[in-house]
Image (spheres, grey):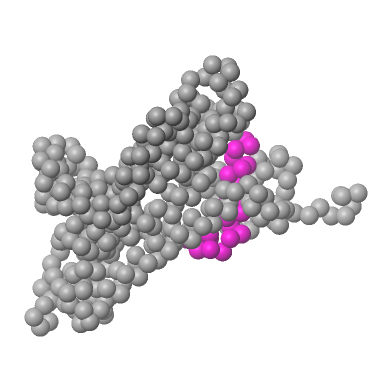
Amino acid sequence: MQEVEQLGEEYQRSILDRISDSFIEFLVSIISAVRKGWREKNRSRIAEWKLMFYALNRSPPGVIGLFLVTIFVFLGIFGPYFAPYKYNYFPIFDNGDTYLSPPGQFFLLGADHFGRDLVSLLLQGARTSLVISVIVILMGVPLGILLGLVAGYFGGKIDELIMRVTDMFLAFPPLILAIAFAAVLPERISYLINNYIYLQQILLWLFALDAREAGNLSRLLAVMIAMAIVWWPGYARITRGSTLTERESLYVESAKAIGLSSAKIMAKHILPNIIGPILVYVTLDFGSVVLTEAGLSFLGLGATPPIADWGRIVYDGSQFFPKAWWLIIFPGAIVLFDVLGWNLLGDSLRDVLDPKLRRSIEFKVKRKKPKEERR
């Protein structure tokens, strides 16, 4: 709270504000431990971070979205370790012509047609969904931002070339294009994974899989690459549009006048000023990646058993519907709330990152001074 008070403003802090302040202080302490004197040089930035959280805490949809996202990220990181059983544990139950068991009979949420605990599969699937989402965003977003910055800053033939390639990708529906790449890539990727053991071990660790699933990694990697290939054009478009506006600003002209290189101007001056809309887009896209990945797995292009994936669980459940309704309802609800959380958080971040809207929210929570102090 010190940084906010040093700006001459006082705020009525709620419990959520105190939690967010503690979280920011924790981050600042980590950064300061790595970079000495960072706190003293960035007090105004720290105060701005706290004010952004104050505004977010006043948005009920934003709080709900942040709560849901936090839960799913936590489950994605630690879920496999909390699972009652391993994803590849196949207990045998005599229950007719399949090993299906309804909720409560043997397991809390029932079992699939292999007799595997659905809770364990959902927790393992959270890791699969989170890793694919993060890797797709990390692969696709920087490429789109880089191409958008270059196209918007230099213009001319470079802009035309980049944008025409972008239009070619946007001309095809992203899901159809992802299906095409995901269907072609696995055979080519399997050679890479089998010959680079370190890459194989890293992927097994990321997805919390046993070594026996190494042969199925190519399909997961193919899905990630396929989605990353079709994910960058949107970011190239939005970055280019913002860059075209910012490159005419006085601060850019001043940076050029003192001899800064184009790379430094784009990285240190233009990008920080256009990052707000991009962050909102990234947040919304996390939900889109989860939905697209589940759709590809439902179509049989993603994870294959025994690897757990939400979309694959729904597909397997559809083969036994309505008998095994729990294999559709529970995974479907998980995907619904995950995507809903990212969308709610993204919509609220749009308001928080807009200076005018954020200031109007902050004004409502400023602490009013007593009359004697105002005199």
Query: Is residue 34 inside the magenta stretch?
Result: no
Tell me how many marks there are: 0
Q: Give me the residue at 60% from left, 38% from top.
A: 45
214 to the left or right of 81: left
Q: Is residue 63 shown left or right of residue 69?
A: right
In this rendering, the answer to whether 87 lies above or below 134 is below
Q: Quick one: 302 or 55, which is closer to the camera?
A: 302
In the rendered structure, does residue 49 fall within the stretch colored magenta?
A: yes
Residue 290 seen in this snapshot? yes
Give the overall secondary structure of the magenta segment.
helix
Please give the name of the residue rendered at 51% of the width and 40% of the height, measured from the top-left corner. Answer: 242
- Image x and y of residue 78, in percent: 32, 55
| Residue 201 horizontal/vertical position (percent) | 18, 42
- Can residue 52 be seen in the rendering of this structure? no
Residue at the far top: name it. 259
Q: Position of residue 285 (x, y in %)?
A: 40, 53
Nearer to me, 173 or 254: 173
Q: Residue at x 29, y 69 (%)?
A: 331
* Residue 142 vertical placement versus 352 (above, below): above
Which quadrant would residue 328 be assigned to in this image?
A: bottom left
Which stretch appears magenta?
43-65
Query: How far across and down, in percent of the image, does residue 178 sit?
Result: 25, 52
In what quadrant of the picture does the N terminus appear? top right
Camera-nearest residue between 71 and 174: 174
Relative to 168, is 343 on the left or the right?
right
Q: At 16% across and 59% down in the image, what residue appears?
A: 304
